[in-house]
Image (spheres, grey):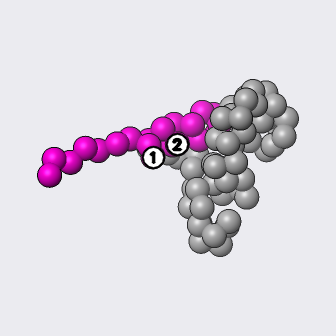
Amino acid sequence: MFDRITFDAHIMGGRACIRGMRIPVSVIVGQIAHGATIEEVLADYPHIEPEDIQQALEYAAWLTQEEIYSI
């Protein structure tokens, strides 16, 4: 489902990263959340691709899906 998001205990302590690089998804999502454009993020991280940013945003959205349980 998220083929560009990787988890490796030896890279960034197992945090969600972009394609095995030391670029956490949280950093990318945080930059976008604070107003950076995709072009600015790509300039800051020349090894990533627009599809990486898109998938980072999709992953963040997936994490926030709420499930409501009746008690």
- Residue at 51% of width from left, 43% of height from top? 59
- Residue at 84% of width from left, 40% of height from top? 44
Residue 61: x and y in percent read 48, 38
- Residue at 66% of width from left, 35% of height from top? 33
Which residue occupies the extreme front position in the image?
71
Instruction: Name the residue carrying label 2.
Output: 60
Check disc 1 and report its element: helix, strand or loop: helix
* Side of 40 where 21 appears, left or right: left
Q: Quadrant of the N terminus?
A: top left
* Camera-side residue of 46 and 14: 14
C-beta proximity under 8 Å, tags 1 and 2: yes
Q: Residues within 10 Å of mark 2 (few under 14, many from 20)?
A: some
Amino acid type of disc 1? Leu
The stretch of residues the image draws in magenta is: 51-71
- Residue at 77% of width from left, 36% of height from top? 41
**Is any part of residue 14 visible from this angle?**
yes
Q: Residue 53 lies in what quarter of the image? A: top right
Check disc 2 and report its element: helix, strand or loop: helix
Q: Is residue 30 above or below residue 21?
A: above
- Residue 59 counted in the magenta span: yes
Instruction: Name the residue carrying label 1.
Output: 63
Q: Residue 32 lies in what quarter of the image? A: top right
